[in-house]
Amino acid sequence: MKKNGQLCISIPENENFFYSKKEYSILTTEVFQTGIGQLWKKNYFYPSEPYYVKNQECLYFNYHFQNNIFYTISFISTEKGNNENQKSTQKTWIRFVRIIKKQDGTMQLLLDAEASGYS
C-alpha cells in the first residue's frame, strides 16, 4: 500500500530468476468488482503508447480503490525485448484484494483468500 492508502500493484522481484531489474511491457490493466463487473480497463497494445515497468515498480491504475470492496485486479505483461507480440511470452497476473480500515484507523491490505473471506 502507498502512503495515500492506494494499492501498489507490481511484478514481484522473484519473477526474475537472477533477481535483477528487468523491464516488462504492460499490455492491459483491469479492475473488476464481484457482482458488478469491470470497473476500469486500459489497453497499451498500440506502439505509440508503450508502457514499460520494472519488477517491483508500481503499475499505474487510474482507479480510486475504496475501503471494504472485494476487487479482482489483473494485468498482462511480456518481458521487454522478447518479441512482445507473441502470445507465448505473455503472462496474465490476477490478484484478489480488499482494503480495510482497522479500528486504530490504519489501513490494511487483504489478499486472495483472506480478501474474499473477510466480512
Image (spheres, rainbow, N blue to C red):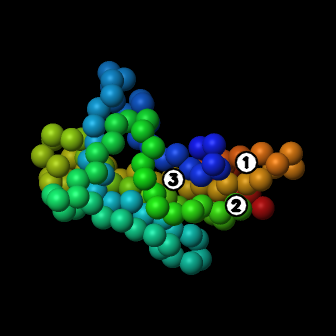
Q: Image point 52% across, 46% down: which residue?
A: 8
Residue behind mark 1: 107
Say above or below: 103 vs 12: below
How crowded pointer 2 is (Cα within 10 Å; few <14, some 14-19, many 20+) is rated as some
Q: Earlier in the sequence, mark 2 or mark 1?
A: 2
| Label 1 – label 3 distance at C-alpha | 18 Å
Q: Residue furthest top?
A: 18
**Numbered tag placed on residue 95 in the rendering:** 3
Q: Earlier in the sequence, mark 2 or mark 3?
A: 2
Question: Within the image, what quadrant is residue 22 found in?
Answer: top left
Residue 60 relative to residue 23: left or right = right
**Numbered tag placed on residue 96 in the rendering:** none
Q: Is disc 1 placed on a helix, strand or loop? A: strand
Say above or below: 105 vs 42: above
Residue 35 image position (x, y, % from top left): 59, 77
Residue 84 relative to residue 23: left or right = left
Residue 98 image position (x, y, % from top left): 65, 56
